[in-house]
Each structure stands twice: as structure tokens, then as C-alpha cells.
Amino acid sequence: MYDELGGKIYDLRYHEEQLSKYDEVLRCLKLSPDEIVLDAGCGTGLFLEKIDGVYVGLDLSSNLISFAYRKAQSLADKHLFQGDAENLPLRDDVFEVLFSFTLLQNLSEPARALSELRRVSRRKGSIGVTVLRKTFSMDAFYSILIESGFKSPTILDTDSHDWIAIINP
């Protein structure tokens, strides 16, 4: 679906909504420039401009990842690749901070994607995940986080269209 939508239309349609989610999550997860960040489901790379350190973005859509690549070309330490969040082509224990914004509702196995995030996260890694409220109830979202192996996730109830989970070590 996102390949057909195109990067420019995606940014026009979702820019403000996505930025408000990013800001909310970043208020809860303080980043330092020396941390390695994964953005699973990075789309057009709107979030990469908010990260000072090493950023790795992954998206299944070739159209959106190409659009993100154009944004990242002029920025240092920004790496993008096409890949599947349910089967991350990454080693275990790599990332200090991980994000997944508005991705899970688009997947056939969201718990698998969350388990993959946990697998590639360093033990002391922090994770921020958002899902559309119209797709998951708060209880269903919490359950899928627990099923994926996360202990004591915090779900924020904000004015956003999304539930926002913060997972700290």
C-alpha cells in the first residue's frame, strides 16, 4: 500500500501526526549521540532528522525507503535498508534505542516483530512503540507486548491517535 502512496504524498499526509508522536516518545526516552538507534518501519525517514547519533532505518516499502535515502544522503551516520520487521536481518544485541512508529497494525505477526526488536536490542536498551488506537485496544497492545517478552511496558494515554509504549530496561 505504501509503495503505491509514494513518499511525497506520505509526508504530506502524515508529517504533522508523525512528528507529534516522535516528540512524545523522545520526551520519555532521552537519547545521547553515542547510541545506535534502530527505526523499524522508518517510512520516508521523517524521524531520522531528529536523531543526532547513528541511525539505522528499515522499511519494507522500496518506494518509501528510496525517499528516505534521499533525505539521509546529506546527513552523517544515517543508514537505511529495505527489510522485514518480522524477520530483522540484524545481529542480536546491537541497538541501544529502538523505535517502531505506527507499524504493528500493518503486519501479519506483530508479536513476532516485537520479539525481533527485543532480540536486536542490547539488554539495557530502551524501546518506543506506537500503534493505532483504532486497531488495538490498550489491553490488546499491552498483551502483545508481554507476549513478545517485554516486562512491565508503560503505555501512555495521550491525545494522539496512537497508543504509545515505552519499554525501559
Image (cartoon, rainbow, N blue to C red):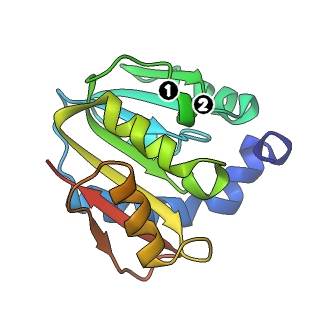
Contact (CB < 8 A) between labels 1 and 2? Answer: yes
Above-or-below relation of 7 to 25: above
Q: Is residue 148 left or right of residue 41?
A: left
Q: CA distance from mark 1 to mark 2?
A: 6 Å
Amino acid carrying label 1: it is Leu
Q: Which residue is denoted by mark 2 in the rendering?
A: 84
Above-or-below relation of 60 to 134: above
| 162, 7: nearer the viewer | 162
Does residue 22 appear in this view? no
Amino acid carrying label 2: it is Asp
Residue 60 place in picture, x, y as percent: 66, 33
Above-or-below relation of 21 to 59: below
Residue 116 place in picture, x, y as percent: 42, 35
| 16, 81: nearer the viewer | 81
**Residue under the point 71% across and 51% down:** 10
Above-or-below relation of 156 to 27: below
**Residue under the point 36% across and 16% down:** 91
Residue 135 place in picture, x, y as percent: 61, 71
Q: Is residue 103 left or right of residue 11?
A: left
